[in-house]
Image (cartoon, rainbow, N blue to C red):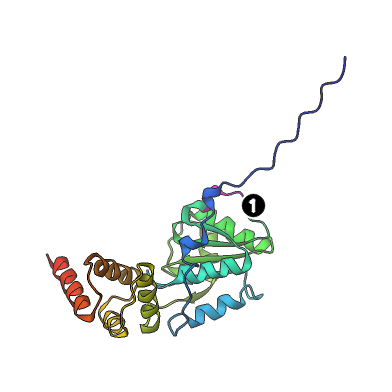
Amino acid sequence: MSARPAPAPAPPRTPPQQLRLPLESLGVSEALVESACNAEAAGVLARWPDGVGVTLALHGPAGSGKSRLAAAWAERVGAIALHGAEAALIEAAELEGRPVLLDRAQDADDESLFHLINLAAAGGGALLLVSRDPPRAWPSALPDLRSRLDAIRVVAVEAPDDAVMAAILRARFAERSITPADDVIDYLVRRLDRSAEAASRAVERLDALHRPVTRALARLALDGEAATDED
């Protein structure tokens, strides 16, 4: 009787694709506009990892462009991109020795975050944590994690300044094939809250009016939005 052939080796495990954020979802497809509000962070990320710590925290208010900066870094170094609670769903072997970007890092559970920080230190990788608040402000029930969070190097992105807001507005208008005059952009920059979300809402509101985008229309749209918010 002939021997039964040995079973074929199991195919290598394919990491779950839902754990990989398309870089476009982090905004890397947009042109990065460097200005006073993000110049320090952009400079640090352009050089990092630089031998000064293996974990870096990038923080800033909503709509400040921190995820866009982080995505550009991830693309440059070939980092694995994770999002918040997804940190609990990936095995350490997949990350060992690799740069890792964890966006919305404050949403990760304590244990997963603790292991990621330790893995970056032990495996020759690098870990970029992105959140609104710096790690010192994150709650933690693990004393060992608390000490690590307090020691992490941090760099801040400020709310968008005039130059960045103008660039965001032009990009949002271009997506809708609208090219407003400079005075429209200047007017919106002065009136809007300092965030990418505010710029997107204003452009969407103007586009919905189906009229040439002028400064008068911008005033009408913003005044109408303010009246709606007061109601």
- Residue 61 at x, y percent in the picture: 38, 71
* Residue under the point 51% across and 74% down: 154
| Residue at the limit of the structure toward the top, as seen here | 1
* Residue under the point 56% across and 70% down: 73
Position above or below: 188 against 71: below
Neighbor class of circle 1 (other Cα within 10 Å; few <14, some 14-19, many 20+) is few
Q: Is residue 44 magenta?
A: no
- Residue 3 at x, y percent in the picture: 86, 20
- Of 155 and 62, nearer the camera is 62
| Residue at the limit of the structure toward the left, as seen here | 231
Position above or below: 177 against 111: below
- Of 53 and 157, nearer the camera is 157
Residue at which label 1 appears? 94
- Of 215 and 72, nearer the camera is 215
In the picture, measured across the screen, residue 18 lies left or right of residue 195, that is right
Say which quadrant the N terminus sits in. Answer: top right
* Residue type at tag 1: Glu
Residue 43, image quadrant: bottom right
Say which quadrant the C terminus sits in. Answer: bottom left
* Residue under the point 24% across and 67% down: 205
Answer whether residue 88 is visible to the viewer in this image. Answer: no
In the picture, measured across the screen, residue 155 lies left or right of residue 227, that is right
Answer whether residue 221 is visible to the viewer in this image. Answer: yes
* Residue under the point 38% across and 68% down: 175
- Residue 88 at x, y percent in the picture: 52, 50
Please report the bounds of the magenta region as a residue range: 87-91
